[in-house]
């Protein structure tokens, strides 16, 4: 491994791999550092998570040359989406034919995306990958940054990018504070087969005491996401398959017929994170290291992909003009283009979670009113649909400009 690189990326998750993919044609040397093994990186295993890609994310993956590496037989189009509130008739419904697109989004297994990204990066001659390695510190040296590994190795880079999860150690080491929101919830995800067709419709059911979501996969199968209080999760994970199948079938009120578990149940604690700033000297945050979302709006991956796309565009422009890719003006432009929308998404999503998971009687009445109002007021439905699909980014420019004036 050489002692100097143009860019060092810490973390080979989807955001880090995406950024590396974007640098394949650039005339620079890139190092991708991953703490996990090469086997886990090259052959990722199913983890229960299904990614709902927006149209913007699909466009970015195609631009990166990654989309065609994904097994298209595993891709499911999201045609409709419905939101329910408990046992009330309050309902918000979206159809792709009511918007300007043929589908609200596209559901892809997370491991398929990770595998395709890795395959794309492996096609590069200008990208080195080191696994089973941990970066201990990043020290700014004006003309470069020095990357210090846990085993005391050191190397220089013009720009260091952290994409090492929402619990980023490097973010803390370089002095960037982050707001962390512990929802005291656990998300349990599992693939389930069912007797009746899902008709490519995603469901979000804010039941009292739990949140239940269904993401339609290929055929008569769906990814079921059950969100419960942390103190209830172990009992549900310990259920027999028979008892779990019965519970989920009843939770969906038999709408899909008998539901049967496929594979194992995966669980993830729900903790939201938003960094106070996305940049430092010759340093930038992307992916969950910048903002880790609650999954209720299914926008975490999409925000990460959008952020790295903004940064790669600016880096490529700087390279074409012979400018310093780690310069403060470039990084400041990146932050301005990305941070305001992420704040809107982060705090807005947390507000939705607070509204729809509070079972106080007065709050139930408020959220039923909100759903009914949104369902019967076309401009609001159109705005939400475009927000979900990212089919028309221009709709949110006025909101982003307003957020820039807020003292977060």
Image: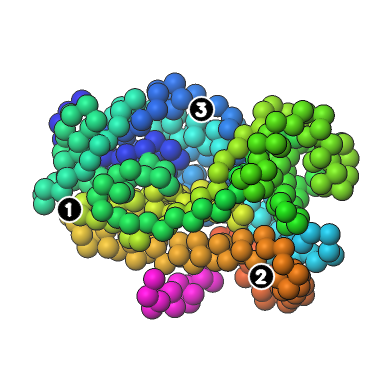
Q: Tell me the residue at 66%/55% (across/down).
A: 104
Quarter of the picture holding the C terminus: bottom left
Q: Residue furthest toward the top?
A: 39
In the depicted structure, whether residue 248 falls above or below residue 329: above
Name the residue that disc number 1 marks: 324
Name the residue that disc number 2 marks: 382
Q: CA distance from mark 1 to mark 3?
A: 35 Å
Name the residue that disc number 3 marks: 44
Which quarter of the picture shows residue 96?
Answer: bottom right
Q: Is residue 34 left or right of residue 30?
A: right
Q: Is residue 328 left or right of residue 242?
A: left
Tag 1 secondary structure:
loop
State which tag comes first along the sequence, 1 or 2.
1
Q: Tell me the residue at 49%/24% (across/down).
A: 43
Q: Which residues are magenta?
A: 391-408
Tag 3 secondary structure:
loop
């Amino acid at each position: 491994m050489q002692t100097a690189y143009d860019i060092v990326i810490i973390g080979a998750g989807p955001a880090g791999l995406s950024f590396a993919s974007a640098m394949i044609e650039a005339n620079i040397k890139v190092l991708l550092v991953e703490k996990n093994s090469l086997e886990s990186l090259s052959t990722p295993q199913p983890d229960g998570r299904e990614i709902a890609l927006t149209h913007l994310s699909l466009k970015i993956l195609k631009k990166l040359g990654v989309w065609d590496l994904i097994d298209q037989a595993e891709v499911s189009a999201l045609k409709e989406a419905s939101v329910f509130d408990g046992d009330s008739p309050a309902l918000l419904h979206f159809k792709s034919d009511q918007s300007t697109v043929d589908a609200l989004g596209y559901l892809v297994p997370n491991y398929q995306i990770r595998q395709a990204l890795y395959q794309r990066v492996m096609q590069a001659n200008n990208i080195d990958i080191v696994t089973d390695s941990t970066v201990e510190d990043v020290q700014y040296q004006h003309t470069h940054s020095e990357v210090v590994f846990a085993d005391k190795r050191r190397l220089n880079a013009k720009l260091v990018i952290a994409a090492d999860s929402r619990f980023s150690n490097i973010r803390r080491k370089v002095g960037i504070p982050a707001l962390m929101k512990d929802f005291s919830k656990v998300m349990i995800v599992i693939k389930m087969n069912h007797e009746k067709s899902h008709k490519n419709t995603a469901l979000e059911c804010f039941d009292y005491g739990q949140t239940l979501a269904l993401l339609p996969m290929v055929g008569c199968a769906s990814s079921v996401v059950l969100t419960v209080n942390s103190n209830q999760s172990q009992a549900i994970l310990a259920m027999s398959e028979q008892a779990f199948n019965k519970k989920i079938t009843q939770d969906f009120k038999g709408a899909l017929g008998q539901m049967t578990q496929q594979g194992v149940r995966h669980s993830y604690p729900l903790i939201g994170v938003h960094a106070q700033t996305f940049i430092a000297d010759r340093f930038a945050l992307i992916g969950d290291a910048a903002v880790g979302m609650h999954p209720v709006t299914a926008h975490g991956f999409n925000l990460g992909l959008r952020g790295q796309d903004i940064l790669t565009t600016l880096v490529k422009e700087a390279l074409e003009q012979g400018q310093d890719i780690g310069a403060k003006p470039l990084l400041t432009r990146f932050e301005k283009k990305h941070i305001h929308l992420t704040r809107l998404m982060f705090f807005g999503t947390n507000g939705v979670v607070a509204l729809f998971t509070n079972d106080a009687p007065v709050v139930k009445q408020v959220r039923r009113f909100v759903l009914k109002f949104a369902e019967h007021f076309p401009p609001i439905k159109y705005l939400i649909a475009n927000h979900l699909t990212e089919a028309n980014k221009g709709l949110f420019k006025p909101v982003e400009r307003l957020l820039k004036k807020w003292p977060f």
